[in-house]
């Protein structure tokens, strides 16, 4: 079964064509340069950029799909028209995300479904980040078997959640952030240090190579709370007051130590709660998805944690899968299609605050 998947939830216009867990082609137009100068995503600019680029990204993904299938025939029509002959359904992210950005992808999915008479599948973006760990390339690599149950740690710019998966598409939210998300905290810390957006990769670069991680002491939020929730806004405030006591010269000189201290505090909080979840559930196989999983320090900490519990940690297998991409949406859609979980056009509406525990439409 081939699925054409669309994700326009934030600042990437992404289209993929998938087959089961295999991502045959994935096209992304990143708007990061549009938003960097504003220090964050500007919804109206995101909407316009999605509208301007979506057809081009669809053509590109279709072209790569046909190439991967080895079709060298003379083309009398668009790549999309040709690719549609092999496509069974259209999947689209309907939340969470920016309302007016989601809307662009949803409208496109509905238009394509109508024009080419295909079924529609609505996907939660966060389900996508979980399933990005199961992704394979067009040759079916890596071939890691899927063995439930899993604990999933989702760490993105808008979300920090611990989820128990007993089976496909079944989510029990064990804990989540009560304020800022982990990625958001890193973005804000970078801003406080005078750097741009997105801050996570900047903090990682600054912190890499820092051996003495304890020069600056920051709290480990929610460390003692018995639940599995996270909180990062107090940490950001502590960081703010720490910087306020320093001169600009001192901050610049010590930026790498400050970045490292902040990153350590965020990651240790994630690790403490993940370990608590392992102890509470007895589940030792862990999936980690969302933009922050691009971070190499975090990956190494998570590997050590899993090893301590004789478990296994699975990350998205290719770098592009850590960020937003439609490939992961197509993978979720495949499992939904297997269950017959299709949606009517009228059932799909943008849902900016969609939660994972909610049953998907259809
Ligand atoms: O999943 P994502 O691309 O978009 C959302 O759905 O939010 O996540 C973006 C977040 C940003 O906060 C960004 O700073 C963070 O992921 N991020 C990183 C790294 N790369 C991206 N955080 C830490 N280290 C990185 N290398
Ligand atoms: Zn995302």
Image (cartoon, rainbow, N blue to C red):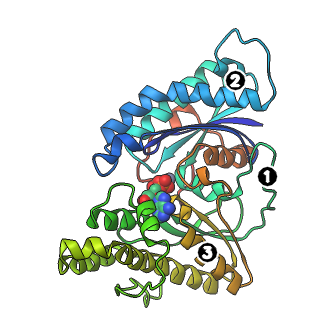
**Vertical side of 200 occupied by 327: above or below:** above
Say which residue appears at 59% left-offset and 22% top-offset: 114
Asked whether mark 2 and ligand 2 are closer than 8 Å, the reply comes as: no
Of circles 3 and 1, which is in front? 3
- Secondary element at image label 1: loop
- Percent x, y for residue 175? 50, 74
Of 91 and 60, the residue lying toward us: 60
Residue 273, how many percent across, how many down? 52, 81
Distance from the alpha carbon under mark 2 to that under mark 3: 41 Å
Residue drawn at the location 33% of the way across and 68% of the way down:
189
Residue at coordinates 69% horizontally, 36% vertically from top-left? 3
The residue labelled by disc 2 is 84
Mark 1 → mark 2, Cα distance in angstroms: 25 Å
| Circle 2 SS class | helix
Which picture quadrant has residue 309? bottom right
Task: Say what secondary structure mark 3 lies in.
Answer: helix
| Tag shown at residue 323 | none
Q: Quadrant of residue 129?
A: bottom right
Q: Are marks 2 and 3 in contact (CB under 8 Å)?
A: no
Nearer-N-terminus badge (2/3): 2
Task: Pick the residue in front: 343 or 81.
Answer: 81
Residue 40 in the image: x percent, y percent?
A: 32, 51
The quadrant in which the C terminus is found is top right
Q: What residue sits right under mark 3 in the picture?
A: 300
Residue that mark 1 sits on: 141
Q: Is residue 246 left or right of residue 300?
A: left
Q: In front: 249, or 341?
A: 249
């Amino acid at each position: 079964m081939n699925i054409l998947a669309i994700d326009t939830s934030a600042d990437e216009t992404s289209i993929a064509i998938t087959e089961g867990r295999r991502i045959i082609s994935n096209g992304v137009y990143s708007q990061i340069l549009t938003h960097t100068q504003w220090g964050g995503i500007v919804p109206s600019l995101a909407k316009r950029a999605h509208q301007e680029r979506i057809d081009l990204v669809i053509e590109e993904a279709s072209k790569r799909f046909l190439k991967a299938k080895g079709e060298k025939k003379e083309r009398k029509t668009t790549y999309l028209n040709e690719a549609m002959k092999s496509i069974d359904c259209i999947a689209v992210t309907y939340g969470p995300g920016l309302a007016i950005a989601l809307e662009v992808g949803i409208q496109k999915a509905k238009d394509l479904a109508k024009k080419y008479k295909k079924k529609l599948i609505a996907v939660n973006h966060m389900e996508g980040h979980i399933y990005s760990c199961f992704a394979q390339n067009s040759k079916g690599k890596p071939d890691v078997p899927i063995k439930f149950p899993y604990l999933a740690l989702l760490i993105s710019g808008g979300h920090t959640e611990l989820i128990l998966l007993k089976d496909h598409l079944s989510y029990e939210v064990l804990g989540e952030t009560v304020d800022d998300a982990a990625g958001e905290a890193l973005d804000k810390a970078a801003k406080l240090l005078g750097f741009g957006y997105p801050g996570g990769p900047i903090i990682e670069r600054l912190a890499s190579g820092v051996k003495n991680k304890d020069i600056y002491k920051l709290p480990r939020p929610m460390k003692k709370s018995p639940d599995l929730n996270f909180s990062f806004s107090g940490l950001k405030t502590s960081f703010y007051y720490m910087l306020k006591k320093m001169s600009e010269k001192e901050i610049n000189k010590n930026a790498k130590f400050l970045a490292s201290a902040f990153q350590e505090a965020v990651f240790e909080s994630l690790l403490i709660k993940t370990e608590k979840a392992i102890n509470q559930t007895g589940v030792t196989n862990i999936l980690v998805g969302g933009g922050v999983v691009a971070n190499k320090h975090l990956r190494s900490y998570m590997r050590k944690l899993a090893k301590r519990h004789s478990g296994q940690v699975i990350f998205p297998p290719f770098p592009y899968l850590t960020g937003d991409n439609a490939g992961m949406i197509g993978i979720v859609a495949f499992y939904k299609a297997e269950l017959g979980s299709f949606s009517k056009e009228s059932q799909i509406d943008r849902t900016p605050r969609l939660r994972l525990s909610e049953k998907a439409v259809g």
